[in-house]
Image (spheres, rainbow, N blue to C red):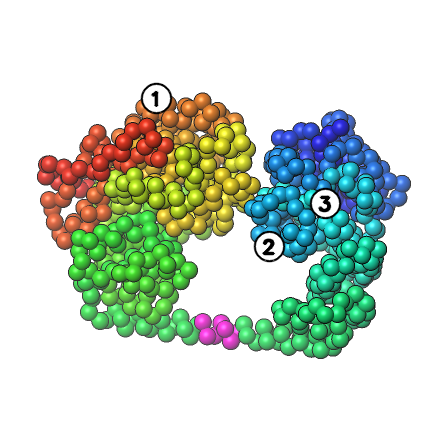
Amino acid sequence: MPRFSVIVPAYEVQAHLHACLESVLSQSYEDLELIAVDDRSPDVCGEIIDEFAARDPRVRAVRLARHSGLGPARNAGAAEATGDYLLFLDGGDTLTPHALRAVADRLKETGEPDVLVHDHALVDRSGESVRDAFAGRLAEQGPAPFRLEDRPGLLRVPAPAWNKAYRREFVEREGFAFPPGRHTDAAWTPPVLMAAETIATLDRVCVHHRQDRRGELPDADAHFDLFEQYDRVFAYVDTRPGLGRWRPVLFRRMVDDLWAVFADRDRFPRGTRAEFLRRARVHYRAHRTPGHPVPARSRARHAVIRLGLYRTHRFAELARGLGRRTARPVARLARSLHAAALRLHYRVQRCLPLREDRAVFAAYGGRGHGCNPGALEEAFRTFAPHIRTAWVAHPEHHHTIPTATRRLRPGTAAHWTALARSKYLVDNTDFDHRLVKRRGQILLQTQHGTPLKHMGLDLREHPAAAGDLDVEALLRGADQWDYLLSPNRHTTLTWERVYPGGYTTLPYGYPRNDVFQRATSEDVRRLRESLGIPEGSVAILYAPTHRDYRRTQRAGLDLDRLLRRLGPRFVVLARAHHRHGGPLVSPATGRVIDVTGHPSVESLCLASDALVTDYSSLMFDYAGLDRPIVIHADDREAYEASRGTYFDLRSCAPGAIARSEDELIDIFATGHWRGSRSTQLRSAFRERFCPYDDGRAAERVVRHVVLGETGLPPVVPLAERHPVPSAAAALDRPPLATVPRPATDTPVAETR
C-alpha cells in the first residue's frame, strides 16, 4: 500500500501532461502511485500516459469509455487508488520539487489528519507564477491537527481539490465523490472540510496550477452549473443539522463565486450574462440566511445580485470604462507638465551658488539607508560634522534613514534642488542620467561589491546579462565620477578597465565592512535575538545571486530538506537578491527565517555563523569577518556561459565548494565547513581580497575627499585584525577586543 495516490485526469492537455507526470515521478519521496485517467482525450494524452506506464511501474493508466468531465474522471481514478492519502492534480499542474516529502513530514507531524491543506501558486500563460493571496491562512502556528471550527477562515481559501491531501479512508467512509460540471470543486471542498474531524495546514507551495484559457470560447452553460453545485452544498448542510452554523459563511462564499463569474464578461456569449444574473438573484434569495449582516466591503456586489441590477451594473461598467479612457490622456498630460516644471526648476537651481556644506547620498536606486553610501553618510556626520547630509529614498524606505539625516523623495523638487546645489554626491549605482555635473561638485561612486561576474563594458560579450546596456551612457556616467572606491587590487584593475574615465581610485576598503571590525559580541547577541535565532543554534546565511539565464528566479536549495538532514541545531537565514522581487522561499518550518526584507545585509552577516552562497559578491565582504564560507555551485557552467566570471572560483575558493545539494549537506554534517582546510582557503582568500577592510575605510574616505588630509590612518595588517566572532565561535573562546589603533602613521597608497 503506497503512501500517496496521485490522481491526474487528462483531457486536451497534451502540451503540459508530460511535465505534470514527470513532476510526480521525480519527487524525492517515492512511496506513491500515479493514477493517470485518460478522459477520452482527442489528442495524444492517452499515448503519453501509456508511455509513462510502460517505463515506471508506479504509473497506472485508466481509460474511460467516453468523455465524462473532470469530476467523474477523478472519481474513476479514486476508485482505483490504494494509497493512504489521495492527491488530485489537473493535467496542466505540476508538483514543486520535494513537495510530497514536505506533505509526508507534515502528515506525520500532525498525527495523520483527515485533510491537509497546502499552498499553491498560479501560473499564467507566460509562465510567471504568483503565490496565492490567501497564503496567510495556512500558517502552521497553533495546535495541529484541528477542526474547522478552530480555523473557520479555511472556508475562505480557494476551493480547488488540488491544494489538499485527503485520507482515503475518510473519503470512502463519508462517501464523497465529485459531481459532474465545470465547477465540481465548489461542491466538493466545503463538505469535505466540514466533515473532517482533523485538519492540518502546510505553509508551502506544493502545486503550480496552470491557468491557460487560450482558445477557450465563452460557454454560458459551463458556468451556469455553478448554481447546481451550490445547491448540492446547501443540500448537504440541510441533511446534517449540526452544520447549519456554516450557512452564512457558505452563502457569502457563494456570492463571491457568482460575482467572480459574472464580473468576467469574457466568460459569456452575448445575451446570456443578464440571464446569469437573474439566476443568481433566485439563488441569493433561496440560500440567504436572515440575521447575518453583509460585510461592508461586499455590500455593492450583494446589492447587484440581490436586486438583479443588470442595467445599473452595465451602466456603471460603461461609466468606469469611459472614465479610464479619459483619465489616461489627462494623466499623461499632467505627468508631462510636471516633468517639464521639474526640468525648469533644476535648470534654475543650477544657476544658484553651490552649497559647500551639503552632501546627498543614495543606494540601489532609492532603497533605504545602507551599503557603502550608508556607512559614508555616518562617517560624514562623525568626521565632517559641518556637512549637512541628505538621503534619497522612496517613502517605504524612509524609516531606515537616521533622524539626523534629511529625507528626500526621488523626483521631487527638493530632490532636484539637492542634486543641483550640493557639493558632494555619493551613490553605489548609476547616478541619474539627467544629472548635469557642475563645476565644484564632487561625485563619489562607491560601487557595491568585488566583481566576480562580468561588469560594465565586459557585459557586451554577454547579451543575456547586458539587457539594454547603453554603452554611451555608461561612458558618460563614468566621465562624471571624481572618485571610485575599491577594496582590493583585483577590483581596482577591473573597474578602471570596464568603467574607463578620468576619476581617481581610492583603494581604502569598503566602508560598509567597517562594522565587522567594530561590532561586539553583545551586538551579535542582540541582532540574533531580534531575528528570532534560538540560543545555541548555528545560523547559516543563505544568499544566492541573480541568474541572468533564468526567466524566473527560484531557490537553488531545498532549505527544509537541508535542515531536516542537519538536525535541530541549525537554522537558515534566507535572503533573496534585490533583483529577485520577493521572498526566496516559502518556509515550511520555523527554522527557515526569511530575511529578504531586512534593511542591512551587514547585520545579517554579523548574526550568522556561516555563509552559503554561489557567485554573490557578498562572499568577499563576509571573508573580512573570518567566518566559514561554503560555495554551492551546482550550475557553474551555465552561470559562466551566461554572465562570465573574472576567475575560476574553484582555483581561489573562500572555503569548501559543493556541486550539489547532497554535497552541501555532507559538508555541514561532517564539519568540513569549518575544518582546517576550509580555514586555510579562507585565509588565502582574505589576504587577496580583504587587504584594506580594517574598520577605518569610511574614515579614510572622508578625511581624503572632504577634509583634504594626506596623512591618512594606515591599514591594520590582517594578522592584527580581530573581527567579532560568531555566536557559535564565541561559545568556544572569549570575545576578542575590537580593532586596535595602529602605532604607525604610514599613509595608505592612492592609485588611479
Q: Amino acid at mark 1?
A: Ser
Residue in the image at 12% along x and 49% along y: 709
* Residue 416 position within the rendered picture, expressed as x and y whole percent measured from the top left: 32, 67
Examine the image and state in which quarter residue 37 appears: top right
Precedes in sequence: disc 3 or disc 2 = 2
Q: Which residues are magenta?
A: 329-335
* Residue 450 position within the rendered picture, expressed as x and y whole percent measured from the top left: 33, 40
Precedes in sequence: disc 2 or disc 1 = 2
Q: Tags 1 and 3 in contact by the CB under 8 Å rule?
A: no
* Residue 545 position within the rendered picture, expressed as x and y whole percent measured from the top left: 44, 41
Q: Which mark is residue 676?
A: 1
Q: Amino acid at mark 3?
A: Glu
Residue in the image at 38% along x and 55% along y: 367
Between 115 and 261, the residue placed more toward the observer is 115
Q: Is residue 366 visible?
A: no
Q: Nearer the viewer, mark 3 or mark 2?
A: 3
Q: Quadrant of the C terminus?
A: top left
Q: Which residue is mark 3?
A: 197
Residue at the extreme right of the image, as rendered: 65
Q: Residues within 10 Å of mark 3 (few under 14, many from 20)?
A: some
* Residue 663 position within the rendered picture, expressed as x and y whole percent measured from the top left: 49, 25
- State the SS at label 2: loop
Q: Which residue is mark 2?
A: 133
Between 104 and 180, the residue placed more toward the observer is 104
Residue in the image at 45% along x and 22% along y: 670
Q: Residues within 10 Å of mark 1 (few under 14, many from 20)?
A: few
Q: Residues within 10 Å of mark 2 (few under 14, many from 20)?
A: few
Dominant SS type (magenta): helix
